[in-house]
Image (tube, rainbow, N blue to C red):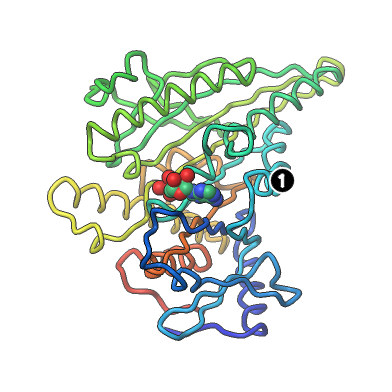
């Protein structure tokens, strides 16, 4: 495969990507080395570096693999020192646009352990809060402010998981004890001509402030972690989708807006061979591969301006269809780990993000 190297080439590649991406932006976040990453990492962990030339600062990432340098560029690169606040500052405008009536999707993509959940949800503690709680805080705060200008907002939250192409309601009554897993409910996705999506039988909760959402997030994460111990760490094998629907109307101007914010923690992107799968695991992995490659096909088709966008190839892309096309806005975080032992997956993730879809069959496609 061709290796893109040097600043000239990087610039060219970067421009191509920007041209292709349209409304979809890609941010890369490198997590710090963690204590449990093991001693074998030592200096090898430092195979990732960040170029310092003017046009690459904050956008480029270099990776040394078997003596070869691979260079990638994104709309933004966050190095391991970037705080949750540093990350949020860069996306707060995007979050805000959901209040202006846009449909917004923010994804976290990467192998298990690369920091997706840390980025989206974060950890307890003010500084450690991730994108989901910060976004909601901002939305409620701004909506309060806009109320003084005649706006009136109502908001509804839902949380679901897609596991093996099956939807699960994380807020279903009784779900937190884990038994709802075998639910016979049919969660059917429907889109109306106005771009509104409904999932039949899915629990939808009116939320009035951050406390409401915090409760729901706790409930959902309980549901997920129960699933984790009962069912083989399924949470990293499923896509998590948080949706906030926002309707606003202004009594002074008669304006009406309907925005949607989708925050998505994708299933781990690690490839088949590594997980050594058989049986159920094989099915899981195939279904993850299918839906992640469906997502990349959709994003790439949109980015290229194709007439046909294959939304129907997976539950996830079908669910998000109205929030990915048209004048919606999407952002993909590519989370990567700095561990030397993860370099193969890291390259796949970086390629997924820059050229989309490189890894579905485990053989990198040619980079252009
Ligand atoms: P994933 O969701 O991709 O499986 P996690 O978000 O669970 O990965 O991250 C794996 C571990 O690394 C967790 O212990 C998490 O707290 C930690 N971690 C990830 N990113 C960061 C970061 N930027 N700073 C500090 N710790 C991080």
Residue position for label 1: 89
| Image location (x, y in percent) of residue 131 | 59, 39
Viewer-proximal residue among 118 and 256:
118
At 34% from the left edge and 31% from the top edge, which residue is drawn? Answer: 225
Helix, strand or loop for disc 1: helix
| Image location (x, y in percent) of residue 183 | 25, 22
| Image location (x, y in percent) of residue 328 | 62, 44
Eyeballing the image, is 235 above or below 216?
Answer: below
Viewer-proximal residue among 140 and 194:
140
At 34% from the left edge and 32% from the top edge, which residue is drawn? Answer: 167
Eyeballing the image, is 174 above or below 268?
Answer: above
At 53% from the left edge and 41% from the top edge, which residue is drawn? Answer: 120
Q: Is residue 101 left or right of residue 171?
A: right
Q: Residues within 10 Å of mark 1 (few under 14, many from 20)?
A: few
The answer to whether residue 116 shows anywhere in this view is no
Quadrant of the frame with the N terminus: bottom left
Q: Is residue 53 left or right of residue 312?
A: right
Viewer-proximal residue among 308 and 41:
41
- The quarter holding residue 322 reads top right
The answer to whether residue 11 shows anywhere in this view is yes
Q: Name the residue furthest left.
A: 279
| Image location (x, y in percent) of residue 341 | 36, 67
Viewer-proximal residue among 286 and 217:
217
């Amino acid at each position: 495969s061709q290796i893109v190297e040097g600043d000239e080439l990087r610039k060219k590649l970067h421009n191509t990507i920007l041209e292709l991406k349209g409304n979809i932006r890609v941010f890369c976040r490198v997590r710090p080395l963690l204590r449990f990453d093991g001693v074998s990492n030592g200096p090898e962990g430092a195979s990732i570096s960040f170029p310092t030339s003017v046009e690459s600062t904050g956008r480029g990432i270099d990776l040394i693999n078997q003596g070869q340098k691979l260079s990638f560029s994104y709309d933004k690169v966050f190095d391991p020192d970037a705080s949750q606040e540093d990350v949020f500052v860069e996306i707060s405008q995007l979050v805000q646009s959901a209040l202006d009536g846009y449909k917004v999707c923010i994804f976290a993509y990467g192998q298990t352990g690369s920091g997706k959940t840390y980025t989206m949800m974060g950890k307890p503690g003010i500084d450690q809060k991730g994108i989901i709680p910060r976004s909601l805080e901002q939305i409620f705060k701004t909506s309060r402010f806009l109320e003084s200008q005649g706006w009136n907002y109502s908001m509804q939250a839902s949380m679901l998981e897609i596991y093996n192409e099956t939807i699960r309601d994380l807020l279903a009554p009784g779900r937190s004890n884990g038994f709802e897993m075998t639910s016979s409910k049919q969660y059917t996705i429907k889109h109306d001509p106005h771009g509104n999506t409904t999932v039949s039988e899915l629990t939808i909760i009116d939320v009035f402030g951050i406390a409401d959402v915090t409760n729901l997030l706790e409930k959902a994460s309980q549901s997920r972690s129960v699933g984790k111990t009962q069912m083989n760490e399924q949470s990293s094998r499923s896509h998590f989708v948080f949706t906030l629907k926002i309707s606003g109307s202004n009594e002074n101007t008669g304006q009406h807006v309907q925005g949607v914010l989708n925050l998505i923690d994708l299933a781990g992107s690690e490839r088949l061979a590594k997980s050594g799968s058989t049986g159920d695991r094989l099915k899981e992995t195939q279904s993850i591969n299918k839906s992640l490659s469906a997502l990349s096909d959709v994003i790439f088709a949109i980015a290229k301006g194709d007439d046909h966008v294959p939304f129907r190839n997976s539950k996830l892309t079908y669910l998000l269809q109205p929030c990915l096309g048209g004048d919606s806005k999407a952002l993909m975080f590519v989370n990567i780990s700095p561990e030397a032992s993860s370099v193969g997956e890291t390259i796949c993730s970086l390629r997924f993000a820059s050229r989309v879809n490189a890894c579905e069959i485990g053989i990198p496609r040619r980079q252009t």
